[in-house]
Each structure stands twice: as structure tokens, then as C-alpha cells.
Amino acid sequence: MSSTWRIGSILHAVGLVVVLAFALFPFYWMVTSSLKEQTDLLASPPVWMFKPSFGNYQAIFADRTVMTAVLNSLIVATSTTALSVALGTPAAYALARYEFRGKADLWFWFISNRMISPIVLALPIYLVSRQVGLLNTHLVLILIYLTFNLPIVVWICTDQFRSIPRDLEESARLEGASQFDVFWRIYLPLGVPGVAVSAIFAFIFSWNELLYALVLITSQDLKTAPVVATNFMSGYELPWGKIMATGTVIVLPVTIFAMLVSRHMVRGLTMGATK
Amino acid sequence: MTTASQSHPAPQTSTVAGARRRHHPGYGRWTPFFFLAPAVISLFFIGIYPTVFAIVTSFRRYNITRRADMLDGFPFVGFDNYRQAFSDQTFWDSLLLTGKFFLCVVPLQIVLGIMIALMLHRPGLGLLRAVTRVSLVVPLATTYAVVGLIGRLIFNRDFGVANQFLGWLGIASSDWLGNPTGAFTAIVVMDVWQWTPFVALIFLAGLSMVPVEVEEAARLETKSHWALLRYVQLPYLLPGLTAVLILRSADVLKLFDMVFVMTRGGPGAATDLISVFIQRAGFKVFNLGLASAQAILLLIMTILLSRIYIRVFYKEIE
């Protein structure tokens, strides 16, 4: 009994270590490659032990393109996150606490946005923004990212607001609080955990987005980080060290954010179908 | 009598509250609409308006690089674009390839996902389990475009680590991204890496729904892990399985970033999944009429998918 248990336990541990290695390997390979010098990078077969150097990071931090792109990504992702929280939380409150006709349809419409391929909207948005002069602005990205950020904010916050006891609202009303006060002073403060989780998701999705940013922005100064990282891939000799350093700079912040919301990851990616 | 007088106060207070409520602004029937309006109006302009625009464009001859089209004012051509899309073999090839990709990727993710979920669910080794669980978030959060960049490095012909791994197993190295089968395999591997954790976490959520008493009783009954999985845990995994199938179909139809960065759809059309295909029609060839028609067809598939998803998972709201 105890020996089979021990064997099972060892297999379990081995299995978990394999999963851990599988999950982290590409990330590990990116980070270590970013610390390699060109000769180590181009070694064939690849080297696992090498003298780490920060040369690639120095190179990209000195490169205005990469830093501008990271800053652009930061501007776009922060703005669209703030906007989706500002627009989404009142809607979530209404969906959580009111009954009205068409509520189910509205709900479905929000959820359907999770499924839609960006390429469907990218073409018409390109044409429309070309006509109204929004092409090549951060604003168009900030707005278009609402199509996936608003649904996620609405979904998670509705769920959160529903869990707030109604008594609080009732007594506040008896005290003479207006409807907006109830939302602003009760629901929003008490719903902070949900608001924060949905804001982090919105930030991650916007930070990672490539397709819209690729087709709607052509001016070098306005490009976001994923687009600039992708642009490295043209040319004859690829600067792999710089590419991987840029990749690390892009991925590291969102990975940390994602770890903060790891418990909610599934909920965020399935729009709550699985809790 | 007594019962009547006792039951009276309750409705009375509520009328009082109701009357008082009416004195304050913002308690009317229209209140929810004020709260909803900003979100709905903005999503309408950003989501619905362009979709309508795409539908209209799909019925026009609309190539912005052709002067003739522009001078004609992008004339309406009825169903011409749709006819062209349907008769275009490359469009069907791309859809078929997308289906093939789904069939390669999703069963693998389901099998690996269940195995990982079972390992994460098994009691014991608390710290290692917790660390592994959190590590699963890393692939999910990695920027899709960067996954493509990493893929290009890993599968490089000369200094890629994939060839080194295969070398250790005694398999000759190859130019992965340079040949059709290799490139397709490479995007399959990267997608399996990125999305297996998602599937695993969904199944883990399902496993944790099994009541503890039921699972413990079953563990006492049988030592067979298979029987436990088949008769006790499987019913709790099925909703997750449906979610995986629908969401992954939608995601495969959406898949663009990683493939675009890794292969640009090549070599030839070996990795030309549907979103990459339409992107090229629209933004390289600039035949926006045709591309819109293709995008609308894709949209219809997506809407069907999300309808099914909603039917299955949000029954209680409907």
C-alpha cells in the first residue's frame, strides 16, 4: 500500500514538473535568449550555458523606436481600460439590479462580442476611420478596443455587483440617496475587487492586441509595442537578441498582472461560463 | 382579522418607501437606461455601425487601389463578391485548413488538458501543485505576437532549439518554417503551448465542482483512477468540454497574430488560416468588397457559434 502510494506520489511529482517545464520553457527561452550575445544566439546547436549580458537591453533602451512603442502601448491600454471601466460599470450596475425588457438580448450582445474575429471589424473600421480622419491616431485604437473590453468589464462587474446585499441599497435610499449616489457610494466602492480584476483583463487584452494596431496605425511614432516587435522580422539578418529583449519587455508586465488575477483567469476567458 | 391586521404593515411600509422613492430624482422606470446608455451607445457605434458598413461594402465593387472603382463611386454589384468568394478555391482551402488546424489542435489540448487538470486536482504536493497552477497563466498572458516571435526562434533551421531536442532523440533536423508540413506543425505546437493551460484550467474548475464527500467515498470504493474519472468526475467535466469546443472554434477562427508573425500564412498557403487569408485580401490586395464579403461569412459562422454557446451556458437568463 505505502509503496504504491509512494510510486504514485513520485509519478505525480514528475508529471507536475514536466507540466511546469512545458508551461515555462518558451518564456524561459525568450528571456535567456535576450541575455545572449550574438555569437551565443547563432550557435548551432544552441547553447544553454553562457555568460549573460545586458547588451540587448541597452540597445533597445537606447533605441527610440522601442521605447516610444512601449509608451504608446501604455497610453492606449491605460486609456481604453479607464474608458471601459467608466462606461462598463454603470451598465453592469443596471444589469445587476434592474429588470427591463430586452435585458437578455442586451446581455447576449455583450457576450457575443467575445466571439467576433477582429478581422471582421478591422476592414470597415479602417474604411470609416479613413473617412473621418481617425486613421493613424491612438483614439481609434482606444475606441475599437472597447469592443472586447466593455463586455469583459460588464460581465465581471455584473457578477460582482449582484453579490452586494440589497439591504445596503435600500437603507441608503431611505436616507435619501439618489440613484447615482447608490451606484457611486455603495456599488463602486464595494465592487472594487471585481472592477480591479476586469480592469486588469482589459489592460492585458489591449496591451497584447496586434491586428487592429497593425492595420490602423502606419505612422512609426504611433505604433504599439507588438507591432514594433513584429516589424523586426523584416530584413536579412535578424537581430534576435534585440527581438527577444523587446519581447521580454512586452510580456513581463502583463505576465505579472496575469498572475495577480490567475484565480479569475478562466472566468475572464470564458465570460463566466465556467467559474 | 388578526392575521389580516398582522400582515398589513408590510405592504404599507413598502408603499411608503415607494412614495418616498418617487420624490427623489433618478428612481423612475428609465433609470436603468441612463446607466446603460453610455456603454450601449458607444458599443453600437464601434461595433454595429462598422458591421453594417461591412455588409454594405460587401455588395459593392470596392478596391481602393483601383481608380476606376473610385471614379464609379464604388458601384453596387449585388451578390458578385459573395459569388466570387464562394467560387474562390483558395477561400475554401483556407477554411478547410482552419478546420484541419482545429482538428489537430483541440483534441490534443483536451487530452493534455484533462491530464494536467487531474494532476493539479490530485491531493498532495501542495506547493508544487500551486506553483504549477500559477505557471499555467504564463502562456495565456503572453502576447500572441511574441508567441510567434518565440516560435520563429525555436523552430529556426540553423540555431533553433526544436532541432536540438529532436537531435537528442536521434531525429534529423529540418527546416521547420521552410516546408509546408513543418510550418503547419510549428504553429500547431505553439498553439498547443499557449492554449492547453486554458483548457486545463477549465477542466480543473470542473473537477473542483465534484462534491468532496462523493469523491472521497468513490476513492474508498475503487483504486482505479480510470473508474473514478469515468463514473464520478466525467459528468462534471462535460460542461467544460462544451465550453472548450465552442470557445476554441471561435478562437481558431480569430487566430491571426501568432500565425502572421511566424509564417505570414506560408510557405505557399500551408498555414493560411482564415483570418490571415482575409487580412491579406483586404490589406495587401485592397479588394475590400471581396474581403468584406468573406468577413461577413466569417461573422455569420461566429454568430452561430456564440448563439450555441449562449444556448448551452446561459439557460437561466434566457
Image: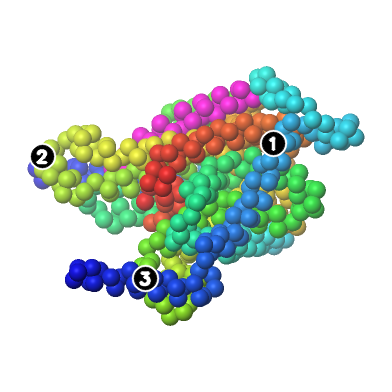
Q: Which residues are magenta?
A: B91-118
User: Which residue is label 3 attached to?
Assistant: B14
Task: Provide the chain ID for the residue under circle 3.
Answer: B
Q: Residue at x 60, y 50 (%)?
A: A147
Q: Is B18 placed above or below B216 here? A: below
Which colour scheme appears in the figure?
Answer: rainbow
The reply to whether the C-beta atoms of the residues labelled 1 and 3 are less than 8 Å apart is no
* Identity, as a three-letter code, of the amino acid under mark 2: Glu
- Quadrant showing the N terminus of chain B: bottom left
* Identity, as a three-letter code, of the amino acid under mark 3: Ser
Mark 2 to mark 1: distance in Å? Answer: 60 Å
Q: Nearer the viewer, residue B30 or A158?
A: B30
Prevalent SS, magenta region:
helix
Q: Residue at x 19, y 50 (%)?
A: B212
Q: Nearer the viewer, residue B123 or A239?
A: B123
Farthest-out residue, front: B1
Q: Is A100 placed above or below B6 here? A: above
* Identity, as a three-letter code, of the amino acid under mark 1: Ile
The label number, if any, that marks residue B221 in the structure image: 2
Q: Which SS class for mark 2?
A: helix
Number of the front mark, 2 or 3: 3
Q: Are marks 1 and 3 on the same chain?
A: yes
